[in-house]
Amino acid sequence: MAGCMRLSSRQADQPDRDRVYSGLIGRWRGTLEVQPAGAAGGAAEPDEVPTEVMVRPAPDRDGLSLQFRYRDVFGRGVTNERHLHFNKTLTLAEWETVEHGRRDAYEVVSQSGGGTVPLRLVLEADGTADARPARIRETIEVTPGAVEVTQEARKPGESFTFRHRYRLRRAE
């Protein structure tokens, strides 16, 4: 006797790692918003710089390779590469800054959407901000034509404050 199980719409819309990866692969253009140095608690308007991001499957291991190109607030060209990896259940993530060999492990504290609705993942980890211990939060929002990645930091005894945000649209 063969059986068939139909997923509820909630389960069917839950993101899985392969759909997250495939939704991010491609060329993206937009802006990087950066909180000006010394601007506490979002007191100043963020600086915006044009940005391009190329996202590919990582050739040497599981995950994605992201190459960022932008001009910093001083007009200097910047290129950096990061590697993003999620575990299969989308409960843990790792961001690696390739140039520095630095890996930051994150817990996925919230996930919603996927499938037919916009995907939103909230990642948190202990780290540093302005050379002080802080809780770092990265929020990744993906729709078919846009990606937004926002980083915030919370120092002990304070609230989360904006650090930077990529606002990107599919360029291909």
Image (cartoon, grey):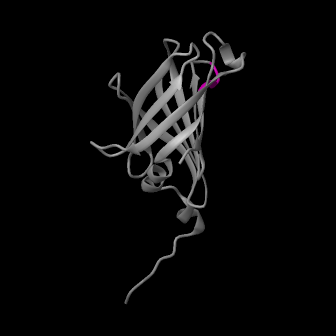
Left or right: 101 in relation to 35: left
Quarter-of-image position of residue 161 = top right
Q: Is residue 155 visible?
A: yes
- Residue 128 visible in the displayed image: no
Q: Residue 115, relative to residue 54: is it above or below?
A: below
Taking the image as shown, residue 75 lies to the left or right of residue 159, namely: left
Task: Locate residue 125 relative to residue 171 in the image: left or right.
Answer: left
The answer to if 159 sits in the magenta stretch is yes
The residue at 49%/11% (across/down) is 131
Residue 75, horizontal then vertical, whole percent:
56, 16
Residue with the most extreme bottom position? 1
Is 2 or 40 nearer to us in this picture?
40
28 or 94, nearer to the observer: 28
Farthest residue toward the left? 60
Chain part drawn in magenta: 158-164
Compared with 154, 56 (above or below) is below
Q: Percent from the top left, x then y, of residue 141?
A: 59, 44
Residue drawn at the location 55% of the way across and 30% of the way down: 51
Count of labels shown?
Answer: 0
Task: Identify which residue is drawn at 49% across, 36% down.
Answer: 53
Assign the N terminus to one quadrant of the image: bottom left
**Is 58 in the magenta?**
no
Q: Position of residue 138 (x, y in %)?
A: 54, 34
Residue beneath the point at 59% across and 67% down? 9
Judged from this view, the residue extending furthest toward the top is 38
Position of 87 relative to 155 (above/below): below
